[in-house]
Amino acid sequence: MLILHCPYCGQDVDETDLHAGGQAHLKRHGPGSSDDDFEDYMFMRENPKGVHFERWRHVYGCGKWFLAARCTATLEVFGTYPAQTTEPPQDIRDRISAKRPGWTWGDFA
Amino acid sequence: MSDAISALQGRMVPGEVTVREAGLRGMITLRGDLSDAALRGICTDVTGQDFPDRGKISAEGETAMCWMSPDEILILLPYAQVTGALGRIDAALQGQHHLAENVSDARALIFVEGEFAREVMAKVTPVDLHPAHFGPGDFRRSRLSQVPAAFWMPDEDTFAVICFRSVAEYAFDLLVASAKGGRVGVF
């Protein structure tokens, strides 16, 4: 069972109160971008065994979207942060680095 | 005009833990910028309560303010006062981006009263209800088994549960079944 901290409610929320929203930090490229960029945005996803960044929605609570960093192999949660964030905050990266040295995910490390 | 009736018309199932539908209660959903002074001011005016912090409720009698989300407050009032209160809110927040709506008849309010009410609730919701984590003054939106619900504790042995009117019967029966199941002895 996954328990995530909702950064808006400040509560630890059970997985069954949440709705999974797939991979976080997808970039939708703007006007003038190539078909390949759009394909990346539309279809290409990370599928890691280990560190992963996801979107979640606190659907039975405040109804807000937030982002979570967790390990897909152990279900360890490194932290959650508001959805209005284009890349993982430094404190969460530091926490991951402390536990999973040398981790990479997409363009982040 | 027809008389307003609550979802379960005050149905009650007595027992060691009594489950009782509260009857009509006025509810106003207010969405807007909760840090705004005018919004906070009119809420305090209408309810006579302090503006609640995140995850909290300030309540007295039939009047309360519940923190629903970073941009939503639920105001509870006696049923007859809702129209007047709504008018005052709209007047105070005129020209300002907000939404205030009377949702009294869209919801049901159920009381769970008794010595192990905490366990009756804990059996049907994923929220950690240990006394160290949840007590009077706290307010939480979650679910009761299969339906969304929000609840708080008016006192140490009582839970008040708000759910949608359409699932009031389900929520009520669920709480009655949980109460009938008896004490667990965890807390």
Image: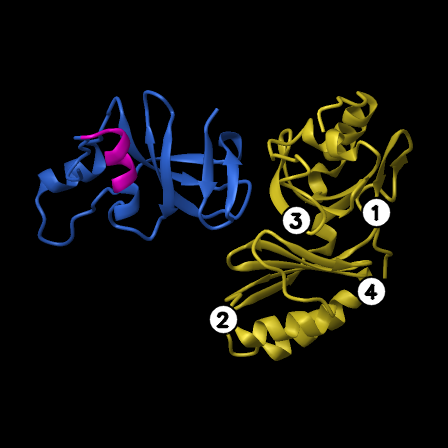
Chain colours: A blue, B yellow
Disc 1 on helix, strand or loop? loop
Q: Pick whichever of labels 3 and 2 is earlier in the sequence.
A: 2
In three-dimensional space, the C-alpha distance between marks 3 and 4, rounded to whole angstroms, equals 26 Å
Q: Is residue B89 above or below residue B6?
A: below
Task: Check whether the beta carbons of the residues at disc 3 and disc 2 lie within 8 A of each other.
Answer: no
**Badge 2: chain ID:** B
Circle 3 residue: B138
The residue lying furthest to the right in this view is B14
Disc 2 on helix, strand or loop? loop
In three-dimensional space, the C-alpha distance between marks 2 and 1, rounded to whole angstroms, equals 33 Å
Nearest the eye: A44 or A18: A18
Disc 4 on helix, strand or loop? helix
Quadrant of the rendered image containing residue A43: top left
Residue type at numbered disc 1 = Ala
Disc 3 on helix, strand or loop? loop
Residue type at numbered disc 2 = His
Residue under the point 86% across and 57% down: B2
**Badge 4: chain ID:** B
Q: Is A89 contained in the magenta span?
A: no
Q: Nearer the viewer, mark 3 or mark 4?
A: 3
Circle 4 residue: B80
Q: Is A95 contained in the magenta span?
A: yes
In three-dimensional space, the C-alpha distance between marks 1 and 4, rounded to whole angstroms, equals 15 Å
Quadrant of the rendered image containing residue B61: bottom right
Residue under the point 51% across and 75% down: B96
Q: Which residues are magenta?
A: A94-101
In three-dimensional space, the C-alpha distance between marks 2 and 4, rounded to whole angstroms, equals 26 Å
Circle 2 residue: B97
